[in-house]
Amino acid sequence: MTLREFGERQGIALSTLTWWRRVFRHAGDEDGNGVAAENPVVFTEVPAPANVPRTAAVLEIVAPSGHLVRVPAGADSDTLQRVLRVLQTTC
């Protein structure tokens, strides 16, 4: 499956997938002096909600890095805190 096909199937813009591919391709690259990059990629598990109907976002958070987090009504606050913490430490 091509990147374009995957994006269309998942509803993700090709430009977004291309950007993330570039980020992950260079994750952990050395800085030229044999030292690992200052901001390594960090993953955090985000549990999938169980049969929660989709609702419109009632809050949008734009991080200084430009990342946009759309928060629906009734969002799990623990998960939101984990996501925001990762954005703070990696951006």
Image (tube, rainbow, N blue to C red):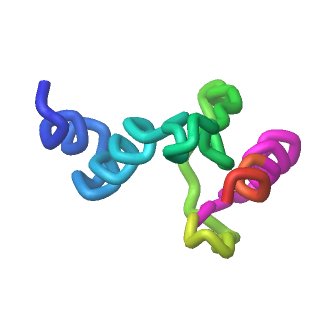
Foreground residue, 20 or 75? 20
Q: Is residue 23 left or right of residue 51?
A: left
The part of the image, by quadrant, that contains residue 65 is bottom right
Q: Is residue 34 magenta?
A: no
Q: Residue at x 57, y 66 (%)?
A: 68
Q: Is residue 73 visible?
A: yes
Foreground residue, 78 or 73? 78
Q: Residue at x 13, y 24 (%)?
A: 1
Q: Residue at x 63, y 38 (%)?
A: 35
**Residue range (magenta):** 68-85
Q: Is residue 74 visible?
A: no
Q: Is residue 83 left or right of residue 35?
A: right
**Residue 23, percent from left and from top:** 43, 46
Q: Is residue 28 left or right of residue 10?
A: right
Q: Residue at x 69, y 52 (%)?
A: 90
Foreground residue, 2 or 10? 2
Q: Is residue 79 magenta?
A: yes
- The image quadrant where one finds the C terminus is bottom right
The part of the image, by quadrant, that contains residue 13 is bottom left
Q: Is residue 21 left or right of residue 41?
A: left
What is the total number of numbered labels drawn onto the structure image?
0
**Residue 55, percent from left and from top:** 57, 55
**Residue 49, percent from left and from top:** 65, 30
Foreground residue, 48 or 16? 16
